[in-house]
Amino acid sequence: MKTIRILLLAVLLPFVVDAQTGHTKNTHKHTVGSGREHQKNDSLVRGVSYSVFVASVADFADSTKKQLAKTAWQLWKHEKWAELEQFFSTNNLNGGWPPNRGALSLKMITLQAGLLVDRYGGYYDADSVFQDKGTFVSFVGVPFPQRALPDKTLQSPYRVYKIVKPIAGVKKGQIIPWFNKPGLGIQFELPYNINDLKKGGYIAEQKDKESPK
C-alpha cells in the first residue's frame, strides 16, 4: 500500500508543480502588463500626468465621470481648446473654469528676487484692510486677453508685487485659451497665498501701478 502511494505521488507531482509554476507565470505576466498600462496612461504631456490632470477637476473624483475625464484629457493633450471649453460647458464641469489650474503646461521653478509680478484679485475687509488669498500671478504687463480670465476680473483690484526673497515650488505654465480669450500668456501658481507671502517678507507691493489692457 505504501509503495502504491509513493508511485501515485511520483506520477502526480510533476503536474502539481507545472500548475503552480504556470499560475505564477500568469500572475507575473498580468502584474507586469497592468504596470505598463498604468505607466502608459500616466506618462507626462507637457510636464503634466493624467493623474494630476484628473485631480485638478473636482468633478472627476466621481467614478461615474471617468469617461468624461478621459475625453477631457485627450482634448487637452491635443490642444483642442475650443472643443475642450465647450465640453466643460456642456457637462457643467469645474464651474466653467479650465482644467489643470488653467495651464497647458507645467514646470516647477523658483521665482528670483527682483522680479516684478502682478495679479487681479483681493478685497477690502470690514476694517478697510486689503486682503488677497489668491495664488496666481503673471509677469508684469501681460495683456489681459493673454491671461484668459473672465471680463469681470477687470473690476477686481490690480496689484504689482516685487519678489524680495526667492520663492521655490512655483508652478509655471502657459495659459489655456478660455473665456473667448486667446490666452497663451505665462502664469505662476505660488505655493502660498499673497497674504502669507507679504507677511513672510517674500513679496512687497509696488504702489501706483496701472493695469495692463
Image (cartoon, rainbow, N blue to C red):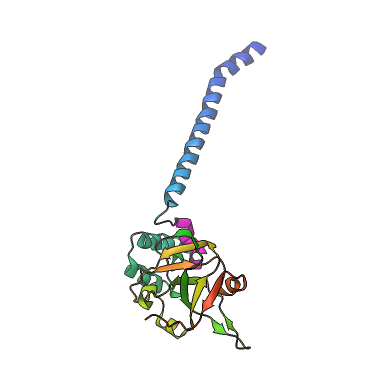
Q: Is residue 198 left or right of residue 187?
A: right
Q: What stretch is highlighted in magenta?
A: 46-62
The outermost residue toward the front is 114
Q: Evaluate whether residue 203 shows in this view.
A: yes
Q: Where is residue 26 in the image (x, y as percent from the top left)?
A: 48, 35
Residue farthest top in this picture: 3
Examine the structure image and report whether residue 48 is included in the region drawn in magenta. Answer: yes
In the displayed structure, 212 sits above or below 29; it is below
Identify the image quadrant of the N terminus.
top right
Q: From what the image shows, is residue 128 above or below residue 18?
A: below
Tell me which corner region of the image, top left, top right, bottom left or bottom right, holds residue 105.
bottom left
The residue nearer to you, when weighing 103 against 121, is 121
| Position of residue 121 measured from the top left corner of the image (x, y, whole percent) | 50, 79
| 1 is within the stretch colored magenta | no
* Quadrant including the C terminus: bottom left
Picture residue at 33% right of the left edge, 60% below the top? 78
40 or 67, which lies in front? Answer: 40
The reply to whether residue 1 is visible in this rendering is no
Q: Which residue is drawn at 60% across and 72% down?
A: 196
Residue at image coords 54%, 64%:
167
* Residue 72, percent from left and from top: 39, 63
> Going by the image, does 180 lie left or right of 68?
left
Numbered-mark total = 0
The residue positioned 43% from the left and 51% from the top of the image is: 41
Residue 12 at x, y percent in the picture: 56, 20
